[in-house]
Image: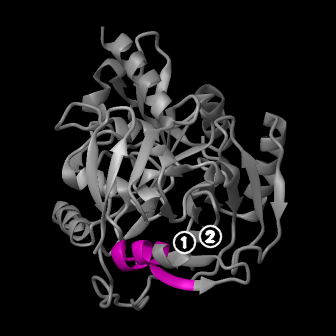
């Protein structure tokens, strides 16, 4: 049931070296720098996004993900969600408006899987980058690299998937779009959505809590994925796998690493859902095909290389 | 350009590494597999090694996998070190490092696929 959580809003990623990171996220991926703050964080957005930023980079001595945030429809819904999170048994932390530049107040909490999430309602609306609001052209000129269209979702690795499912479905109003079940019926992967998309967030079972698998960005076409692969080779960027297709979500995809070892995905296509759709199920016995539809074999790195 | 010999103490495999090249990248370029390859960015810890002898130049690597104290004791991520002399190295995964989890998950997956 809808609780007023609308869509993914931003992700804050830790990098070892900001200058190197910007070559990856701006020059290669094609995000646009929109601001910096006193603490050295750099704010980025993809061109089709309407708010000021969707990716925040923070230099640190350990890479990974600080938090992922979701935008909530209004202040009343945010207040109710805070009550619901506390009733669910979570500690909620408040961050004042302006802690992230041009972003309103945020509330933060940690899922049983060990990941930090945020909710907020307000962020400066800057419109799609390089386009007029009236009679907009098809795309803006001057985009770099892969020309990422939007920040789409994150995949996290951790345990306590049942408790995390309850948090996202019962409290935050996500629905289960796709899943992987083991022979005993335990869910070892859960792809959760707020929209018609196959996932706005995903979790895969892993012994260690709080691990970051990837942040994903949408491209328009399969040709764009091939071109992304060309750029990855031209820049000698470490690649994980692809171009290929997933069984889960059926997205067409390629994975590669930023200079701090955080994984990035660019993808296109994939399944859609409406409220009358049943969740899509893959069997854990067929995990190879579920993850890499063509190879039908798991690459160890996809399961084990995390930040 | 100087070139140094890198020796894996466990497998006794040897390969050459240029002074401006990361040890893991040289290993992959030459087609050896003695050190596991992960993110190649100093982040995931999969290629953690102990430098038994020799000197290296250290790039930035995650403190979650190599603390300052461990670095002083010769631990490093092979994807972030460039040789300054011949090196003898040995794989040194942390107890909870991803490589152990690979083994664990593979066991699980093998069990599942039986």
Taking the spot 36% from the left edge, 56% from the top edge, the residue there is B23
Q: Measuring from the top left, give residue A212's x and y in whole percent.
A: 53, 48
Taking the spot 48% from the left edge, 61% from the top edge, the residue there is B56
Asked if labels 2 and 1 touch by Cβ distance under 8 angstroms, the answer is yes
Residue A283 as seen in the image, left or right of residue A209: left
User: Is residue B45 visible in this depiction of the protein?
Assistant: no
Decide: few, some or many residues near mark 1? Use Cα within 10 Å; few <14, some 14-19, many ≥20.
some
Taking the spot 37% from the left edge, 19% from the top edge, the residue there is B109
How far apart are labels 1 and 2 at the CA level? 6 Å
Front position in the image: A201 or A284: A284
Q: Chain of mark 1?
A: A
Task: Report the residue marked by disc 1.
Answer: A17
Label 1 element class? loop
Q: Which residues are magenta?
A: A21-34
- Image mark for residue B39: none
Residue A95 is a magenta residue: no
Taking the spot 21% from the left edge, 66% from the top edge, the residue there is A233
Picture quadrant of residue A102 = bottom right
Residue A200 as seen in the image, left or right of residue A207: left
Task: Report the residue marked by disc 2.
Answer: A59
Q: Is residue B72 above or below residue A145?
A: above
Decide: few, some or many residues near mark 2? Use Cα within 10 Å; few <14, some 14-19, many ≥20.
some
Q: Is residue A113 above or below residue A253?
A: above
Residue A27 is a magenta residue: yes
Q: Measuring from the top left, give residue A139's x and y in whole percent.
A: 30, 83
Quadrant containing the N terminus of chain A in the rendered view: top right
Between disc 1 and disc 2, whose residue precedes? 1
Q: Measuring from the top left, give residue A205's x and y in whole percent.
A: 51, 30
Front position in the image: A59 or A180: A59
Picture quadrant of residue A11 = bottom right
Q: Chain of mark 2?
A: A
């Amino acid at each position: 049931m809808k609780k007023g959580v609308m869509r993914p809003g931003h992700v804050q990623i830790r990098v070892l070296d900001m200058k190197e990171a910007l070559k990856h996220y701006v020059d290669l991926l094609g995000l646009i720098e929109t601001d910096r703050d006193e603490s050295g964080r750099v704010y980025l957005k993809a061109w089709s996004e309407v708010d000021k930023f969707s990716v925040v980079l923070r230099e640190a001595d350990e890479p990974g993900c600080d938090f992922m945030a979701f935008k909530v429809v209004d202040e009343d819904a945010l207040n109710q969600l805070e009550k619901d999170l506390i009733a669910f048994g979570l500690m909620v932390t408040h961050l004042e408006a302006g802690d992230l530049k041009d972003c309103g107040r945020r509330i933060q909490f940690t899922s049983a899987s060990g990941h930090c999430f945020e909710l907020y309602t307000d962020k400066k609306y800057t419109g799609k980058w390089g386009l007029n609001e009236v009679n907009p052209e098809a795309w803006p000129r001057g985009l770099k690299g892969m020309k990422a269209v939007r920040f789409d979702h994150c995949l996290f690795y951790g345990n306590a998937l049942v408790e995390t499912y309850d948090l996202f479905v019962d409290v935050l109003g996500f629905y289960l779009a796709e899943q992987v079940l083991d022979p005993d019926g335990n869910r070892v992967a859960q792809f959760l959505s707020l929209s018609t998309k196959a996932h706005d967030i995903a979790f895969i079972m892993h012994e260690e809590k709080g691990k970051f698998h990837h942040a994903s960005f949408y491209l328009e076409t399969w040709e764009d994925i091939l071109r992304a692969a060309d750029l990855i080779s031209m820049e000698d960027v470490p690649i994980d796998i692809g171009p290929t297709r997933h069984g889960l979500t059926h997205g067409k995809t390629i994975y590669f690493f930023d200079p701090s070892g955080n994984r990035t995905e660019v993808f296109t296509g994939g399944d859609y859902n409406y409220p009358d759709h049943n969740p899509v199920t893959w069997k854990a016995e067929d995990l190879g095909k579920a993850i890499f539809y063509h190879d039908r074999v798991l690459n160890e790195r996809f399961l084990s290389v995390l930040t | 350009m100087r070139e140094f010999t890198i020796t894996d103490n466990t497998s006794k495999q040897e390969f050459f590494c240029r002074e401006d090249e990361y040890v893991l990248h040289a290993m992959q370029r030459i087609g050896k597999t003695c050190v596991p390859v992960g993110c190649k960015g100093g982040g995931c810890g999969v290629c953690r090694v102990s430098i038994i002898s020799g000197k290296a130049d250290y790039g930035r690597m995650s403190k979650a996998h190599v603390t300052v104290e461990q670095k002083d004791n010769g631990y490093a991520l092979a994807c972030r070190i460039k040789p300054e002399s011949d090196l003898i190295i040995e794989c040194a995964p942390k107890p909870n490092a991803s490589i152990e989890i690979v083994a664990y998950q593979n066991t699980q997956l093998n069990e599942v696929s039986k």
